[in-house]
Image (cartoon, rainbow, N blue to C red):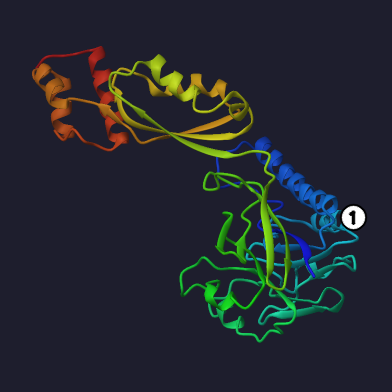
Amino acid sequence: MELSFIHTADIHLCKNFDNISLSMKERELRRNELWEVFEKIIDLSMENEAKYLFIAGDLICSKYAKLKDYQKIQEKLSFLKDTKIIIVTGNNDPLNELSYYNIIDWPPNVHIIKEKNKLEKIEIEEDNIVIYGLSLEEYNPEFKINEVLDVEINEEKINILVLHGGKEKENHPLHIDFEKLNKFDYCALGHFHHHTEIKEHIVYPGTPEPLDYSEEGKRGVVMGKVGKDILFKIFIPLSKRKFITKEIYMQKDYTKEKILDIIKFSGDIESLSKDYYRIILKGELNKDIKIDLIKKEAEKYFRHVEFVEEFDYALDLYKIERENENNLIGRYINETGKITTKPLKLQKSILLGIEELSKEKVDY
């Protein structure tokens, strides 16, 4: 027997996106797009007649969610009448006494794993399958998820593990020794936000829609079929947008026009019009070029762009000091020190000081 499934995790519905520089309007748009990708997952399950949908934690950010948001999840999942849905909670939607997970009237095909200190066991005889899962509650440094994985299984059954954790340091509560998972036929994991196969049967799908600039590349879900000694799976990209980081290396002889051209051709027209870009400016910049003017001009070519300045100004302070040894500019440079390699903020202050003093150069 082979059972079809879709595996997702870390959707983070209702996330507030306060960790990136988005406008309030843009944050609201991203929150709506998280709901859109959730609906895509439901549609994908229906279109492919998935027997199971595994949601491995952090479906929603409970800190920012309201009861109506959980009711909306229930409403969306109610369309999957022929799919058995297994949900475990993660560190961002922990299952505690006050959790809205406990008060929603979930459809009969939706099973919220309620065990928090040991693996819950769900046997479905008609499919010859046993599903093991555990939901997380509030952070507890004494809890070790690794310690609950020592369970005996029936090797004649299809054994599935649904869990939120792993990819952490050994002393972390969510650390998993992946060797303990070899007995399962498929491990539907969540918590690590990048699509990763620890082993063929131990899989993180990653976030289906990226949440910040640390989540580049394709985003989606895992779809497959599992049986005894049979596993087939593919990754299905679903995300509407991408977070893209580009590094621009400038040289001191680059003109304003050349730098602007390099920035605005950081991606193709379609990507620039819909994705989120972070441009890291590196290398050396001519001291006479106003980088803020370039950044402002570049913004009109992007849907969203932010800049990180990691460059140095091409400053020969020794030369400038010698040329101005008898005026305030020379004295100013002397007092700021003669080291040419300085933090960018100090370089900017030196340039500003030189510019102001140049307006009324006074010999002494």
Is residue 93 at all visible to an observer of this figure? no
Q: Residue at x 61, y 47 (%)?
A: 211
Instruction: Identify which residue, 330 or 12, lies in the foreground.
Output: 12
Q: Quadrant of the N terminus?
A: bottom right
Residue 212, percent from left and from top: 57, 45
In this picture, residue 242 sits left or right of residue 346: right
Which of the 4 image quadrants contains residue 338?
top left
Whether 199 is drawn above or below 123: the answer is above
- The residue that disc 1 covers is 79
Element type at marker 1? loop
Is residue 39 at all visible to an observer of this figure? yes
Whether 25 is drawn above or below 257: the answer is below
Amino acid at dot 1: Phe
Residue 270, percent from left and from top: 63, 26
In this picture, residue 304 sits left or right of residue 231: left
Which of the 4 image quadrants contains residue 31?
top right
In the rendered image, the residue lying farthest to the bottom is 152
Q: Residue at x 50, y 72 (%)?
A: 172
Instruction: Identify which residue, 340 or 86, lies in the foreground.
Output: 86
Residue 94, percent from left and from top: 68, 68
Total label count? 1
Q: Residue at x 66, y 47 (%)?
A: 209
Q: Quadrant of the C terminus?
A: top left
Residue 167, percent from left and from top: 52, 65
Instruction: Rate crowding at label 1 as few (under 14), some (14 to 19) or many (20 or more) other CA atoms within 10 Å.
Output: few
Whether 12 is drawn above or below 283: the answer is below
